[in-house]
Image: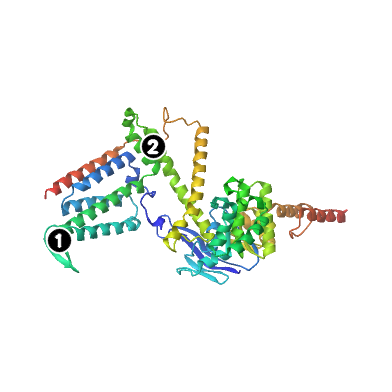
Amino acid sequence: MASSLIIGQYVPEESVVHKLDPRTKIVMIFAFVIFVFFANNGWSYLWLTAFSIGAALSTKIKLRYIARGLKPVWFLIVFTFLLHLFVTREGDVLFDIIGFPIYTGALIQGVQISMRFFLLILVTSMLTLTTTPIEITDAIETLLHPLKKVKFPVHELALMMSISLRFIPTLMQETEKISKAQASRGVDFRTGPLKERIQAVVPLLVPLFVSAFKRAEELAMAMEARGYKGGEGRSKLRELEVRARDYLAVVVFILMIVGLFLLRDM
Amino acid sequence: MDISFTDVSHIYQQNSPFEYHALKDLSFSIPSGKFVAIVGHTGSGKSTLIQHLNGLLRPTKGTIEIGDYRLIAGEKPKEIKGLRKKVGVVFQYPEHQLFEETIAKDIAFGPKNFGATDEEIAERIPEVMRAVNLSETLLERSPFDLSGGQMRRVAIAGVLAMNPEVLVLDEPTAGLDPKGQQEIMDMFYQLHHDKGLTTILVTHSMEDALKYAEHVIILEGGRKHLEGDVGEVFTQKQTLKEVQLDVPEVIQFLMDLDERMGIRIPYEKQTIDVLSNQIKQHLKARR
């Protein structure tokens, strides 16, 4: 079910991580994604895992909830692990599984790749878990601001992003509503042969597109009626502000990276 | 079909920070052939309740019986398609569910899914078009060419064409003009009588509930606040006040009449004409 996947969902809580400036979070997470690939031994992976779990704990969102929300992803992680385990042929043969030789190199690589995968998903999903979509787009707009010099349409991009993010829940609701209405008219989305299930999507998609276009038109009209004329000279309701806690978070993060490089050489 | 709920609870997204108890230990029964109104504010659990009636949602706790079909908490229901064939649901803004190229095809969609033959469908289409008061000349037009009110009628025709025994209506008049509202409600009332349907009307209009229903269930915060025959329920001003519902205008008028002038006329679904005559009689008798 869609409700069990938490990637992209925002969970309101009163925590330091929630209160951090979204720009700080985006930059740190972006850096983390790069530095994950620098880990090269067991200690460095353990170090990164400890940091990510510590960060997850400080969001005050229940770990059990996060773990359960990542359930669909666990499958991918296990799958990647097994794939590397059976395909890679490096190092010595460790043992045989029903005729398949397992190499030491394969075991190490399998663990490494699936660890990376896990860390990436855990940390990136924390961005959306603790930051509202509006904050994220605001942050992206200010972060990309320098690109305006090369005529990159930063404001328009941010507007498009915030509109699409805004309408994701609306469209989800709409989808649920229409699929329920069609299910009441005897459509079966879940069982039956593949061909029939693909055909069952038509009565769902047509009304969805109709209403999406109608909504877009109404939104454009409402924006014009309120005098929207692009980003030029437009002020903001919520100014982003870098505070002491942001500096503190960055310092902690840099210390973590220094620790990572120390552990790399062990 | 008889419908009965026994200690039904429904929890959305159980065991998550978004857990929400939409229904709490709800029990009631609706005998076959009744016209029942379910009244309550936004968030009182009305929509959740009706989605249980054709198995779109399953109870988290408790048992629901609809004719021979049973929905029991924790059990996968059998024959859900059979249940959906017998319980027709007209959702809020049903015109959003139209998708076919022509009106005829859209009306045929439901019955076809439930295995009706082409001959049966060809027979039912003119019948339901008449029932919703639309001209048969429209049949080959696209449903998206129609006005909002007409689109709604087509969508309703699509549900009626399934030949349901139970008709569930979720705020069927929302967003229509007063005349359209009256027409649609009168149409459902007519169908209810002509076809011997069991009709469940979800509404927040006390007036509609009073006018069309025989039995009323008032929901508040997922619980049953009050249940009974229309006359009984709508005269309990105090209990209705508790959940910020008003007594329907006619009843309020009769109450005021009794209080101020000492004229006591019991409410028995009189039309305005009948009622004014009764008042005239009383006033004459006084003189």
The residues tagged by marks 2 and 1 sit, at their Cα atoms, a distance apart of 48 Å
Residue positioned 31% across, 37% down in the render? A243
Q: Please, what secondary structure does the residue beneath circle 1 have?
A: strand
Whether pointer 2 and pointer 1 mark residues with C-beta atoms closer than 8 Å, the reply is no
Q: Amino acid at mark 1?
A: Tyr
The picture places residue B236, in percent across and down from the top left corner, at 66, 59
The picture places residue B141, in percent across and down from the top left corner, at 60, 49
Q: Please, what secondary structure does the residue beneath circle 2 have?
A: helix
Instruction: Please say if B249 is above or below A217.
Output: below
Count of marks, rendered view: 2
Name the outermost residue toward the bottom.
Answer: B68
Disc 1 crowd, CA 10 A, few/some/many (<14, 14-19, 20+): many
Q: Amino acid at mark 2?
A: Ala
Task: Tell me, for residue B83, which label it has, or none.
Answer: none
Name the outermost residue toward the right.
Answer: B287
| Chain label for disc 2 | A
Q: Which residue is mark 2?
A: A158
| Chain label for disc 1 | A
Residue positioned 24% across, 50% down in the render? A51
A189 sits to left or right of A100: right
Q: Which residue is mark 1?
A: A103
Q: Earlier in the sequence, mark 2 or mark 1?
A: 1
Which is more toward the observer, A176 or B257? A176
When asked about the image quadrant of residue A70, the answer is bottom left
Q: Is residue A23 visible?
A: yes
Residue positioned 16% across, 54% down in the render? A42
Which is more toward the observer, B123 or B32? B123
The picture places residue B33, in percent across and down from the top left corner, at 65, 66
The picture places residue B134, in percent across and down from the top left corner, at 66, 52
A92 sits to left or right of B235: left
Q: Is residue B234 visible?
A: no
